[in-house]
Amino acid sequence: VDFLKLNERWEEAGRLLTDILSHQGFSSQKGQSRHQLWLRLCDIISQHPECSRGLRVEAILRQGLSSFKDQTGRLWTALASFFIRNGNYEKARDVLEEALGSVTSEQDFAHIWDVYADFEDRLLADYISFRSNSSASSEEKEEEEREFALRVERYKYLLDRRPLLLSSVKLRRNPHNVKEWMKRVKLYSNARAVVDTYSRAIRTVDPLIATGKPHLLWAQFAAFYGQQNDDENARKIFERGTEAVFRTSAELASMWAEYIEFELKRGDFDRARALLARALRVPSPSSFGALKESDWAMSIASVRQQGLAALSSSQLQAHQRWVAAHLHRSTPLWCLRADVEESVGTAEQAKAVYDKILELKIASPLVIINYADLLQRQSYFEDSFKIYERGVSMFKFPHAMDVWICYLTQFVERYRDTKLERARDLFEQAIQAAPPSTSKIFYIMYADLEERYGLARHAMNIYDR
């Protein structure tokens, strides 16, 4: 083969390589693999099409495409080059379009794109050169003008499509990439295309194996209708989103939160409060008894690999019920409900929400601080201190740190020197509960209390400690 290439006997070299590759047991004396021999054949028949008579060039290259996935870009461009060198430009375009619509690697895409753009650029340059040297009649010049306009538009169309084509490559590699779908939506300015893209994304993305947050597809789809002042369709999308499949109750809670925020932004507080009540409705004990993970037993690994395909119909229903049944324990949704009640409801309604959070045992340190602050603003000082007491008993350090600081600060500001012994007892409790690495601030606050309202020698003893 090397001898034939050296003497530029391309047709014989191509035939010899074809014969070699047809024998499965062939062993190269130079240690070349079938893969390397195949690539050599592809290079010869694509670069020297005039010497490939009798060879089924397209069939050979397409067989290589199915056999050598790591050389996809190179083989596609080799096939296109074969047709270009034969002057069959339309077939070359068909091959390059097919290549751009099938590759899954950004590297292969970039290689094919460069070849395609260079091909169109050279054709356009050659035509410009042809026109400059043409001595055609007026009718022929009009035809040339139309042909030139067509070529320019074809080239511009190719360049304009690059972002969409690249997006398609990424989505073929991972059709469950939520961020890539949202990037793709931004490439369109036409409302119909935006709606179609969101619809395709929702149909395509498997929420159990998705990369990103699937609820954002529903939320942004609905928000798009909201931007068009079509609140009716926006609410339909949100309703569908709240009934969709999600991996966890946290994702479902995020979906509900987006829906509620949508209503709040429109000033429809009654609808927002009704949605919160729906989302946080506590399921009956009977439904809890049937909602065990064993009802949809499967390995987590299997779900991550196969997604919805790994679930039977009964398992899917059980999974949805299991996720929905844990929604009422969503701390972010309860905090949102508390914020709404503080803003548009009464103090008693807000207190009832906070009490329910404590009853469900899903409070965070911030919830404790916010509840106590609400009570203080209503002048229920002792009640607020009781909430702080519940908070410091619920959390350990470091989570209890902020609760203790707020508790001690507000207690001292409220009672100053009137309940000094009680204040001292609280500081001692805080110092005893805090690890040595975080207790410094409590010693400083304790000493400051003694300096302002107590005895100087007590302050000195605290500094010594």
Image: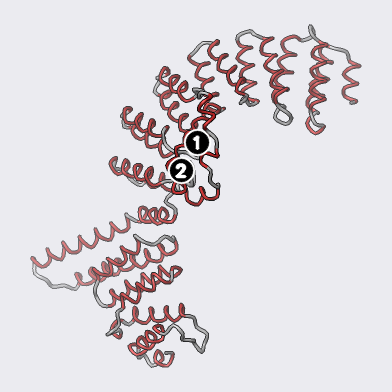
* 56 left or right of 315 in image: left
Write down the quadrant of residue 465 in the picture.
top right
Q: What element carries label 2?
A: loop
Residue 105, x across and y down, in percent: 44, 61
Q: Which mark is residue 251?
A: 1
- In the image, is 123 to the left or to the right of 382? left
The residue shown at (39%, 31%) is: 238
> How many numbered marks are there?
2
Decide: is 448 above or below 128.
above
Give residue 384's mark. none
Q: Residue 247 at x, y = what percent?
A: 50, 40
x%, y% of residue 209? 48, 47
User: Helix, strand or loop at disc 1?
Assistant: helix
Residue 56 screen position, x and y as percent:
29, 79
Residue situated in front as seen by the camera: 286 or 344: 286
What residue type is disc 1 on? Glu
Look at the picture and state if 175 lies above or below 411.
below
Name the residue carrying label 2.
Answer: 207
